[in-house]
């Protein structure tokens, strides 16, 4: 059986500097990650100013927990989870799932069959997702974009797995209705 070579992550030298509280390394880390993590924060909270606060808080957490990174897997993936968790903490604090917009009858909404979502510009689709009610947007991001399971979502948000499934179903129905109403993709 062929043994796989361990390839070091390009972040390792910067991580080493950050662990020594080197300000230049911290700035380099910020410069490398901020442009990738800010859009993640925006997708979860839907507000640019709040996303900046979450980005800041995420970096504070990242620097304080950097010593726990075991250099297994992608550093950027590890960091991404920190920023997602920071956004989720804010959303839990704001109790977004409790105040999610209820759909009168998700089952009666029309399907988007025939819509060419794949032809829609990414920016347009992300703007639509950002306009979702906060609870729907949170679960939609976690499941459809980040790849969390419903049980992981339930655990992260402190809800039941059925509640996570329900929020995702409602988010999909909301998105379908929005696309149908706006006649996107035709």
Image: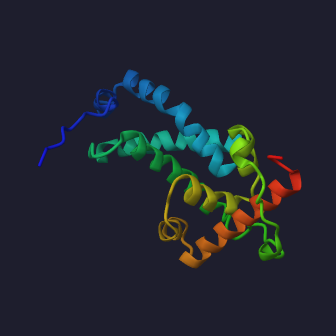
For the point 55% across and 66% down, the residue is 157
For the point 78% across and 65% down, the residue is 111
| Camera-nearest residue between 57 and 6 | 6
Q: Residue furthest front?
A: 114
Q: Could you tell me if residue 36 is visible in this image?
A: yes
Q: Residue furthest top?
A: 24
Spot occupied by residue 174 in the image (x, y as percentages of width and height): 77, 63
Say which quarter of the image contains residue 175: bottom right
Spot occupied by residue 90 in the image (x, y as percentages of width and height): 60, 55
Please state if 114 lies on the left or on the right of 12 as rendered.
right
Spot occupied by residue 140 in the image (x, y as percentages of width and height): 63, 59
- Seen in the picture, residue 153 relative to 74 is either above or below; the reply is below
| Camera-nearest residue between 98 and 147 | 147
| Camera-nearest residue between 41 and 127 | 127
Q: Could you tell me if residue 47 is visible in this image?
A: no
Please state if 46 lies on the left or on the right of 141 as rendered.
right
Colouring scheme, one of rainbow, by chain, secondary structure, one colour:
rainbow
Please state if 3 lies on the left or on the right of 16 as rendered.
left
For the point 53% across and 70% down, the residue is 154
| Camera-nearest residue between 151 and 109 | 109
Please state if 93 lies on the left or on the right of 177 as rendered.
left
For the point 60% across and 45% down, the residue is 41
- How many dots with numbers? 0
């Amino acid at each position: 059986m062929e043994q796989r070579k361990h390839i070091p992550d390009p972040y390792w030298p910067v991580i080493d500097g950050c662990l020594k509280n080197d300000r230049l390394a911290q700035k380099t880390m910020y410069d490398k990650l901020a442009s990738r993590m800010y859009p993640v924060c925006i997708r979860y909270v839907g507000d640019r100013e709040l996303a900046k606060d979450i980005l800041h808080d995420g970096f504070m957490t990242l620097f304080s927990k950097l010593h726990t990174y075991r250099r297994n897997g992608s550093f950027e993936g590890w960091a991404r989870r920190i920023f997602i968790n920071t956004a989720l903490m804010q959303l839990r604090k704001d109790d977004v799932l409790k105040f999610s917009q209820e759909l009168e009858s998700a089952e009666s909404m029309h399907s988007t069959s025939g819509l060419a979502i794949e032809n829609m510009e990414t920016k347009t689709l992300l703007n639509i997702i950002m306009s979702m009610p906060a609870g729907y947007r949170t679960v939609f991001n976690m499941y459809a974009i980040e790849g969390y399971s419903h049980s992981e979502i339930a655990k992260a948000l402190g809800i039941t797995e059925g509640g996570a499934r329900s929020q995702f179903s409602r988010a999909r129905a909301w998105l379908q209705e929005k696309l149908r109403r706006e006649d996107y993709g035709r």
